[in-house]
Image (cartoon, rainbow, N blue to C red):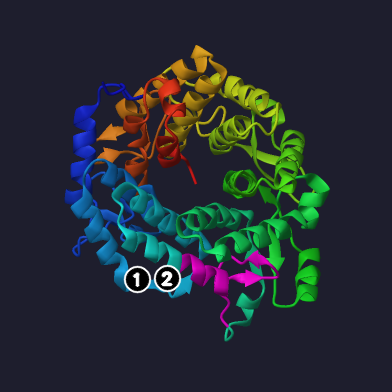
């Protein structure tokens, strides 16, 4: 007997959502687009390739294999060396979900050509994007001096998790070597040594130029998705290698998180150069709960789960009577995708703690997302506490990600016992 979904009995919503991908969310060539308005007018025709990982695995899970195969084929003219080129440049942010999506589709379908594409793209990044042992955010163009000094974001540490999955599937030691190389370099950064959290860096072909440029930078540390993605990768490195220094780095990070980001549960989204926290955010909250649950599950720190509960209890006090969470405490609007992931994070927390209040709040939020955001062409981007639409845009990737609520079981014990489903529902 199949478990009831977290969002309740919403079979018609699932059918409408899947049909909309085929009938409304594509351009004349049949390629998924990025955004449309409530009347179906395309607002952003950019191909959704960078976010295929947020959509295609869910469509494949629901049996839309032919449509998924067509999307991969239609993406080919936009690729070079299996990487998505956005306006002629390779950007790491644009390729993380693309490559991760290829891996997830390979796992769901068994199609080894998808694995081969992911392998090719990942090796291209390793060969071209390292500067001073960090991954820079975008390709350096020698004819453009402004590109010689590049930011390097801890978000790019998320490639470690991807490389380790490729290493497990292919046995290619280059992926493990690159993972160790990148992680070790971030642990040597001045920001991590000073604060225990990861700050953005500036990189040039000359390390001296990088240091000089850094003196005038107003660099900051972002929690979501910079620190969270990087720490998930450290967790993967520790689980893969058993090397104690990765575990020690996570323990050090938890101390930095508690000192700089936790804020009694009203988690800060980012820090300025002085270390002051800014912008209490639902995105920071759900990502922190999710990550801390995974650190707890790995047996790394006894303080991880209490931190997650501190955040959950604080944000449950912000939850509106309609079941949704505001984007910010006291704010006038919510955020569709952040509410989806908050529901999943609370479900996980309920499973790890055994406390039914977290599971109950997860159910309430999941069902409110579908009931309050629904419109004739999909789930709108934002509503207020009274259910009035604040942002009517239909953002296509969020329609795919909302399907998590139909895949997540109502019972958290069932979720925690299913590693493949946990992996599919993760937010990266």
**Which image quarter: residue 408?**
top left
Q: Which residue lies at the image location 54% right of the left edge and 20% below the top edge?
A: 316
Snapshot quadrant of residue 189: bottom right
Q: Which residue is drawn at 67% across and 62% down?
A: 181
Image coords of residue 253 (percent x, y): 73, 41
The answer to whether residue 135 is above or below residue 428 is below
With respect to residue 174, does 336 lie above or below? above
**Is residue 318 visible in this depiction of the protein?**
no
Tell me, for residue 42, which label it has, or none. none
Left or right of residue 419: residue 404: left
Q: Which residue is drawn at 36% across and 54% down?
A: 52
Residue 288 position, x and y percent, is 60, 35
Q: Distance between the residues labelled 2 and 1?
A: 6 Å
Numbered disc 2: secondary structure? strand
* x 44%, y 16%: residue: 360
The disc, 2 or 1, on the residue closer to the chain's N-terminal end is: 1
- The residue beneath circle 2 is 85
Query: Dot 2, crowdedness within 10 Å: few (<14), some or many (≥20)?
Result: some
Left or right: 408 in relation to 222: left
Is residue 42 visible in the rendered image? The answer is yes
Give the residues in magenta: 121-141
In the rendering, which numbered label is found on residue 78? 1
In the rendered structure, does residue 74 fall within the stretch colored magenta? Answer: no
Of helix, strand and loop, which one carries label 1? Answer: helix
- Numbered-mark total: 2
Q: Residue furthest front?
A: 171
Looking at the picture, how far across and down is residue 153, in whole percent? 63, 58
């Amino acid at each position: 007997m199949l478990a009831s979904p977290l969002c309740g009995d919403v079979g018609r919503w699932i059918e409408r959502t899947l049909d909309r991908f085929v009938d409304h969310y594509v351009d004349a060539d049949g390629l998924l687009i990025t955004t449309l308005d409530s009347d179906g007018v395309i607002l952003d025709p950019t191909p959704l390739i960078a976010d295929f990982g947020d959509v295609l695995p869910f469509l494949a899970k629901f049996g839309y294999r032919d449509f998924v195969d067509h999307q991969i084929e239609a993406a080919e003219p936009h690729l070079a060396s299996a990487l998505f080129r956005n306006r002629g440049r390779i950007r790491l942010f644009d390729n993380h979900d693309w490559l991760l999506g290829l891996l997830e589709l390979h796992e769901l379908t068994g199609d080894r050509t998808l694995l081969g594409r992911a392998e090719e793209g990942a090796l291209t990044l390793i060969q071209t994007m390292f500067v001073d042992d960090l991954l820079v955010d975008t390709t350096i163009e020698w004819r453009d001096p402004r590109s010689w000094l590049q930011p390097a974001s801890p978000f790019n540490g998320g490639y470690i998790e991807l490389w380790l999955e490729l290493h497990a599937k292919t046995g290619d030691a280059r992926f493990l070597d690159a993972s160790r190389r990148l992680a070790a370099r971030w642990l040597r950064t001045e920001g991590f040594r000073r604060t225990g959290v990861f700050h953005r860096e500036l990189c040039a072909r000359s390390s001296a130029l990088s240091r000089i440029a850094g003196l005038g930078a107003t660099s900051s540390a972002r929690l979501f998705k910079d620190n969270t993605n990087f720490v998930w990768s450290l967790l993967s490195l520790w689980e893969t290698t058993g090397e104690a220094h990765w575990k020690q780095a996570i323990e050090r990070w938890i101390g930095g998180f508690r000192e700089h980001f936790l804020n009694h549960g009203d988690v800060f989204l980012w820090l300025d150069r002085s270390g002051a926290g800014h912008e209490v955010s639902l995105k920071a909250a759900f990502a922190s709960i999710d990550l801390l649950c995974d650190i707890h599950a790995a047996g790394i720190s006894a303080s991880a789960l209490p931190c997650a509960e501190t955040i959950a209890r604080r944000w449950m006090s912000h939850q509106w009577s309609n079941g949704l969470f505001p984007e910010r405490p006291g704010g006038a609007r919510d955020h569709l995708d952040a509410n989806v992931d908050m529901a999943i994070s609370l479900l996980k927390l309920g499973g790890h703690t055994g406390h039914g209040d977290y599971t109950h709040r997860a159910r309430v939020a999941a069902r409110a997302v579908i009931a309050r955001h629904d419109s004739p062409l999909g789930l709108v981007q934002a509503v207020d506490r009274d259910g009035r639409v604040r942002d009517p845009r239909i953002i296509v990737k969020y329609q795919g990600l909302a399907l998590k609520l139909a895949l997540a079981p109502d019972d958290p014990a069932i979720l925690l016992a299913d590693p493949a489903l946990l992996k599919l529902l993760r937010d990266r």
